[in-house]
């Protein structure tokens, strides 16, 4: 019950108690007064009759006395009048019934007024003729007391109603700060550290608001310190200090984890190494600051060149060398992108370019079926050495001769479009489930839903199809197909755990898909409560409004949201304080050689502390061996998935 209702009820109870006490005291006093008045009235009436009936009593004129008795009784205040002679014989006795209409019986029993008598001697001169007795009737007294009581009740009800109305207005005004404090507490829980201003004028409420403001500022500082610490740690361990790009170790780990990901299936990809010639001349002539500025400019140009490929990895490997890896593109797109990358750095110059001219060389390689990251790096390095044989800027492609049939990713886009439209129309998909288990007891916590596309007798992984579908604008239709297939599978056999489903950021940004998703979740309430949609971390950088709209839609239906491949983009850390998330799933590259990599261990443990303080769970992906699994137990991670724990299967785990 709210404080407001409690105060209103307390006011009503107070008035009831006041009314009850006042009524009891008033009835008691009125009872004593009325009883005394009845006695006096009866005695006065008896005295008056005694004086009036002297002549009739002396003559024993019964008719006259009867007339006098009837006249007195017309007032309704007496129930009996009788006259007795000196011998005690009753000469005349009249009883007059008086009704108690309109007075409840319980009230009569509660008041219990006595029947008072008035006695007077009837004399003639000095001779006593007899005695007249008048017995009062309390009926009129009961009626008047009842009317007084009911009138008091009506006035009490009116006054109580008026007081409650005034109290309602006053309390609403007084309790506004409490409602703001409640909202502030909820905001703090949701990592929104709001400070309330101005302070309430009520001293006690002002003290409470001040205490809440101090707590909000303190928690905000603690949270920001954690974010800053993890951000610094990530930059020190995985970013180049000069350009802000990935460093060599981060690039190699991400490339290796991408290639080793058994679930992602077969991939195409391009890898390029860009080298700036003779940066040492710039450092010697103008200082290292000018050389660093040129390196920063090169990094920015390379990032801009691959903006349309969010999965691309750009890094500064060493000195003046930069490496780029662009996955899931066709050979023609790769060649065009290589031209674009090399062209992006050609017009970079500086103030003393005539003394220390800048020149660039690039080695490039493309694989239609990536099986080894170091192999691609070696080929690109060989191509770079070939490019450096000449003095002028140029780039060289490593001759990658493939035997056998062209892989499926080598299809032209028009054939892909036909294939995907047929898959959508004929629902040519198969759902696979991979377990996500608790670190503490290895219990099943959730299941990741993977989709396979039927290509004749073969199954194509989503990672093969999704990049093509995004380029063709078919991702909203594919995501819709996946969810409808999942709903159909749940109707046949209900899954006992949470279900994690990856959504394309393209779908999240599409208003038509969001309208369909709203209706879908409303019609699939049991499934909606189980779903945990995951979006990649890179989507957090430039889609703030879309993600907030998406998260509000999920909250409406009780569906959760998680961040996939977490840890690669430090810009995403700020969203932890505002988006309602279920979990963060750490990218598999941070698990490479986890048992010996102290930096990754410390980084994951710091992420776990940040996530737990934010009310989130920290999951990891890509657990491939027992050593990685054993190491996670001491890093406060909540759950993990990977081939060591279970491979994706057609049937969900019971």
Image (cartoon, grey):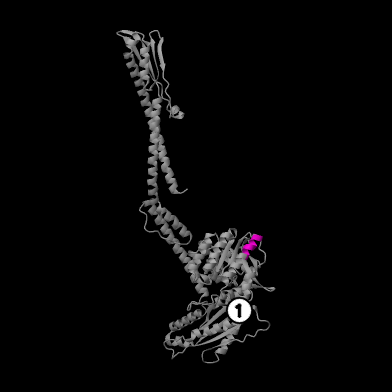
Q: Image quadrant of residue 324?
A: bottom right
Q: Image quadrant of residue 618?
A: bottom right
Q: Position of residue 511 (x, y in %)?
A: 52, 68
Q: Is residue 315 left or right of residue 263?
A: left
In this view of the protein, which residue sits in the foreground, 165 or 309?
165
Does 7 sit above or below residue 426?
above
Instruction: Decide if residue 493 is in sight here.
Output: no
In this view of the protein, which residue sits in the foreground, 544 or 582?
544
Q: Position of residue 307 (x, y in %)?
A: 51, 77
Judge whether residue 450 is colored magenta: no
- Say which residue appears at 39% left-offset and 38% top-offset: 156
Does 45 sit above or below residue 23?
above
| In the image, farthest residue toward the right | 457
Say which quadrant the C terminus sits in: bottom right
In this view of the protein, which residue sits in the foreground, 153 or 94?
94
Does 607 sit above or below residue 285?
above
Q: Is residue 190 left or right of residue 629?
A: left
Instruction: Decide: few, some or many residues near mark 1? Use Cα within 10 Å; few <14, some 14-19, many ≥20.
Output: few
Secondary structure, mark 1, is helix
Q: Chief secondary structure of the magenta span?
A: helix
Which residues fall within the magenta stretch?
485-492
- Residue position marked by numbered label 1 in the rendering: 414
- Say which residue appears at 45% left-offset and 57% top-offset: 185
Instruction: Decide if residue 600 is in sight here.
Output: yes
Judge whether residue 490 is colored magenta: yes
């Amino acid at each position: 019950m709210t404080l407001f209702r409690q105060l209103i009820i307390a006011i009503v109870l107070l008035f009831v108690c006041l009314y009850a006490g006042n009524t009891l005291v008033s009835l008691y006093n009125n009872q004593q007064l009325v009883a005394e008045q009845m006695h006096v009235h009866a005695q006065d009436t008896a005295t008056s009759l005694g004086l009036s009936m002297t002549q009739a009593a002396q003559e024993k004129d019964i008719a006259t006395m009867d007339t006098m008795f009837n006249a007195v009784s017309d007032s309704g205040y007496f129930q009996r009048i009788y006259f007795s002679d000196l011998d005690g014989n009753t000469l005349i006795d009249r009883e007059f019934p008086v009704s108690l209409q309109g007075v409840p019986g319980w009230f009569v029993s509660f008041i219990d007024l006595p029947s008072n008598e008035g006695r007077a001697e009837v004399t003639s001169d000095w001779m006593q003729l007899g005695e007249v007795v008048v017995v009062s009737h309390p009926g009129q007294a009961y009626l008047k007391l009842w009317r007084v009581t009911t009138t008091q009740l009506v006035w009490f009800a009116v006054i109580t109603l008026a007081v409650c109305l005034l109290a309602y207005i006053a309390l609403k005004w007084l309790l506004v700060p409490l409602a703001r404090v409640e909202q502030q507490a909820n905001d703090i829980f949701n990592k929104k550290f709001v400070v309330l201003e101005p302070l309430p004028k009520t001293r006690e409420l002002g003290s409470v608001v001040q205490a809440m403001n101090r707590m909000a500022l303190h928690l905000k500082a603690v949270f920001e310190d954690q974010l800053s610490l993890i951000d610094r740690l990530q930059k020190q361990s995985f970013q180049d200090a000069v350009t802000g790009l990935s460093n060599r170790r981060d690039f190699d780990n991400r490339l290796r984890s991408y290639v080793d990901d058994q679930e992602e299936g077969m991939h195409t990809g391009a890898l390029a190494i860009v080298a700036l010639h003779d940066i040492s001349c710039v450092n010697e002539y103008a200082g290292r600051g000018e050389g660093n500025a040129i390196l920063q400019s090169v990094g920015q140009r390379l990032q801009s060149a691959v903006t349309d490929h969010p999965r691309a990895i750009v890094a500064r490997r060493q000195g003046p060398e930069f490496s780029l890896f662009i996955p899931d593109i066709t050979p023609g797109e790769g060649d065009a992108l290589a031209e674009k990358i090399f062209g992006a750095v050609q017009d970079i110059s500086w103030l003393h370019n005539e003394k220390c001219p800048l020149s660039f060389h690039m080695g490039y390689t493309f694989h239609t079926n990536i099986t080894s990251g170091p192999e691609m790096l070696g080929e690109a390095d060989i191509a770079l050495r070939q490019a450096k044989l000449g003095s002028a800027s140029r780039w060289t492609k490593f001759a990658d001769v493939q035997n056998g049939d062209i892989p499926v990713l080598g299809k032209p886009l028009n054939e892909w479009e036909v294939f995907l439209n047929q898959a959508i129309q004929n629902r040519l998909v198969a759902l696979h489930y991979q377990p996500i288990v608790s670190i503490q007891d290895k219990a099943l916590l959730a299941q990741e839903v993977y989709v396979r596309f039927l290509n004749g007798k073969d199954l194509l992984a989503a990672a093969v199809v999704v990049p093509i579908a995004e380029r063709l604008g078919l991702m909203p239709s594919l995501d819709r197909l996946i969810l409808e297939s999942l709903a159909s599978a749940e109707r046949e056999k209900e899954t006992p755990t949470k279900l994690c489903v990856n959504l394309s950021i393209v779908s999240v940004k599409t208003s038509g898909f969001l309208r369909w998703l709203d209706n879908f979740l409303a019609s699939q309430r049991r499934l909606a409560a189980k779903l945990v949609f995951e979006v990649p971390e890179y989507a957090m950088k430039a889609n703030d409004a879309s993600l907030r709209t998406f998260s509000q839609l999920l909250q409406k239906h009780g569906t959760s949201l998680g961040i996939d491949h977490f840890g690669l983009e430090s810009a995403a850390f700020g969203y932890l304080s505002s988006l309602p998330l279920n979990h963060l799933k750490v990218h598999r590259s941070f698990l490479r050689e986890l048992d010996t990599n102290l930096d990754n261990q410390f980084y994951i443990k710091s992420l776990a502390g940040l996530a737990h303080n934010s009310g989130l769970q920290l999951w990891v992906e890509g657990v491939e061996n027992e050593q990685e699994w054993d190491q996670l137990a001491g890093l406060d991670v909540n759950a993990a998935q990977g081939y060591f724990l279970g491979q994706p299967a057609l049937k969900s785990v019971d």
